[in-house]
Amino acid sequence: MKELGRDEILGLLEREIEKTTAIIEEYKKSAGPIAPDDAIGRISRMDAINNRTIVEAALRTAEDKLTKLIHMKDHIDDPDFGNCARCGNEIPPGRLILKPESPYCVRCAS
């Protein structure tokens, strides 16, 4: 990874970490327990439970992404940073910008 691109990627990672952390906090607020007295009826309570399940899945995905982003930020100074973890080829800068948490090039990720 070129040194010029490193600073850009580091800035992107920091912004993405902040954004993902904020999203996680919002999901945690929405994923709380459903009080039985808050429901108007059985269907609305079931709908609230279904929505909470969807939010919990999104929360797990966001937490996984945050873990990968932090790992990538911690290893940005490694000599093989920006190289595919599977084939060793350089990951295109566009992929690093669009999906910074991915350790694989497009071909190896698919």
Image (cartoon, rainbow, N blue to C red):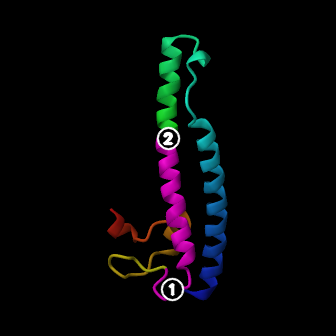
Boundaries of the magenta span: 56-81
Residue bearing the label numbered 2: 56
Residue visible at 52% across and 79% down in the picture: 75
* Residue 20 percent location from the top left of the image: 61, 55
Identify the element where label 2 is drawn: helix
* Residue 28 percent location from the top left of the image: 59, 43
Residue bearing the label numbered 1: 78
- 25 part of magenta stretch: no
Identify the element where label 1 is drawn: loop
Local crowd size for mark 2, using a 10 Å CA cut-off: few (<14), some (14–19), many (≥20): some
Mark 1 vs mark 2: in front = 2
Q: Nearer the viewer, residue 68 or 102?
A: 68
In the image, is residue 57 above or below residue 91?
Answer: above
In the image, is residue 73 above or below residue 28?
Answer: below
* Residue 48 percent location from the top left of the image: 53, 24
- 75 part of magenta stretch: yes
Left or right of 13 in this view: 71: left
Confirm whether residue 66 shows in the render: yes
Left or right of 78 in this view: 26: right
In the image, is residue 77 above or below residue 71?
Answer: below
Q: Amino acid at mark 2?
A: Glu
Local crowd size for mark 1, using a 10 Å CA cut-off: few (<14), some (14–19), many (≥20): few
Quadrant of the snapshot with the C terminus: bottom left
Q: CA distance from mark 1 to mark 2?
A: 34 Å
| Quadrant assignment, res 107 | bottom left
